[in-house]
Amino acid sequence: MASSEAARLLRIARRDLNMARRLLDPEVEEASWGWAAQQCLEKTLKAWLRSTGVKPPATHDIARLLLLLELAGIDTTDLLPLRAFTTFAVQCRYDDEPEELSLDRPQWCNRAEALIDQVQKLIE
């Protein structure tokens, strides 16, 4: 069951990643791109939690999801920079002039895809 739920979450994460890739145009505000990227990362981390048998909480907080992965015995050191995306989950969506983080969008999309692929291999 956990595996099928993890697979479902990864399918949605890939959909969110496709949206983030469509928003790579520099004319698109970073907040809009960041929201799609954040959703992708959130679902990927929740799929990873599912693969360990942990039911993820209803949260957009990437740091919280990383902590739960660490508690499940996963080294999250390389994933800590993902915490920056939590700001896109709520603050940027409701702020009419969000602060630019000037993230390298293509690089982050590639990193998100690599993470999805990594989790996909865990559930196969």
Image (cartoon, helix red, strand yellow):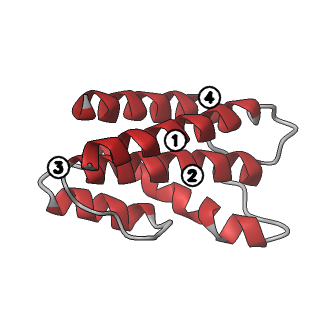
Residue ID for mark 3: 74
* Badge 2 vs badge 1, beta-carbon distance below 8 Å: yes
For this orientation, the residue located farthest to the front is: 1
For residue 100, side relative to residue 3 (left or right): right
Residue ID for mark 2: 39
Closest to the observer, 48 or 85: 48
Residue positioned 16% across, 63% down in the render: 71
Residue positioned 72% across, 55% down in the render: 100
> Comparing marks 4 and 1, which lies closer to the viewer?
1
Residue 9 visible in the current orientation = yes
Q: Which amino acid type corresponds to the residue marked 1 in the rendered image?
A: Ala
Residue ID for mark 4: 106
> Comparing marks 2 and 4, which lies closer to the viewer?
2
* Badge 3 vs badge 4, beta-carbon distance below 8 Å: no
* Badge 2 vs badge 3, beta-carbon distance below 8 Å: no
User: What SS does tag 3 mark?
Assistant: loop
Q: Which amino acid type corresponds to the residue marked 2 in the rendered image?
A: Gln
* Badge 2 vs badge 4, beta-carbon distance below 8 Å: no
Residue positioned 56% across, 52% down in the render: 38
